[in-house]
Amino acid sequence: MNYELVAYQADLNFKGEAGNSMDFSAGSSPDDALASAKRWLEGQTRAYLKQHPDALDKSWWKAGTITATFVDEGAADQPRATLRVRKDKVAPEFDWYE
């Protein structure tokens, strides 16, 4: 069954600590909405790390998720992408997996 994608919801959830959340309307360009959600989540992660400079080490940590939201009754929201982050030499290193 095909369901209508309404939005992507991005949630900052660094190391299990709930953070900010934002919805991005899919409209006529779901790819643009997903790209915007990813940029927002990376920005929120950078802001979190500035406030918590010792939060990272060289291990990968889950920083947040993006979930696809559907309008149709009976459609379950589906995880779309997860952001991982770890400490690199100069700046945080980000990795998206779907």
Image: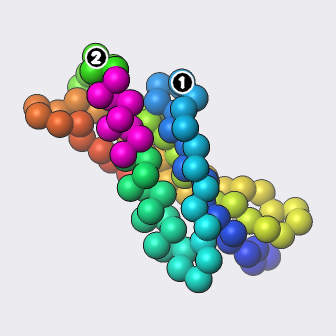
Q: Are marks 2 and 1 in contact (CB under 8 Å)?
A: no
Residue 16 vertical position relative to residue 36 in the rendered view, above or below: above
Q: Secondary structure at mark 2?
A: loop
Q: Position of residue 8 (x, y in %)?
A: 60, 60
Pointer 1: residues within 10 angstroms few (<14), some, or many (20+)? few
Residue 93 is inside the magenta segment: no
Q: Residue furthest right?
A: 73
The secondary structure making up most of the magenta span is helix
Q: Position of residue 29 (x, y in %)?
A: 53, 79
Number of residue marks? 2
Say which quarter of the image contains residue 23.
Answer: bottom right
In three-dimensional space, the C-alpha distance between marks 2 and 1, rounded to whole angstroms, equals 15 Å
Residue 50 is inside the magenta segment: yes
**Relative to the observer, which residue lies in front, 20 or 60?**
20
Which residue shows up at 74% across the image and 65% down it?
70
Asked whether, in this view, residue 11 is left or right of residue 52, the answer is: right
**Residue on which disc 1 sits:** 17
Residue 98 visible to an observer of this rendering = no
Residue 40 visible to an observer of this rendering = yes
Which residue shows up at 46% across the image and 30% down it?
14
For badge 1, the amino acid type reads Glu
**Residue on which disc 2 sits:** 54
Q: Which mark is residue 95?
A: none
**Relative to the observer, which residue lies in front, 70 or 97?**
70
Pointer 2: residues within 10 angstroms few (<14), some, or many (20+)? few
Q: Position of residue 85 (x, y in %)?
A: 33, 37
Asked whether, in this view, residue 39 is left or right of residue 10, the answer is: left
Instruction: Please state the extent of the stretch shown in magenta in the rendering.
Output: 43-51
Which residue shows up at 11% across the image and 34% down it?
90
For badge 2, the amino acid type reads Asp
Asked whether, in this view, residue 82 is left or right of residue 75, the answer is: left
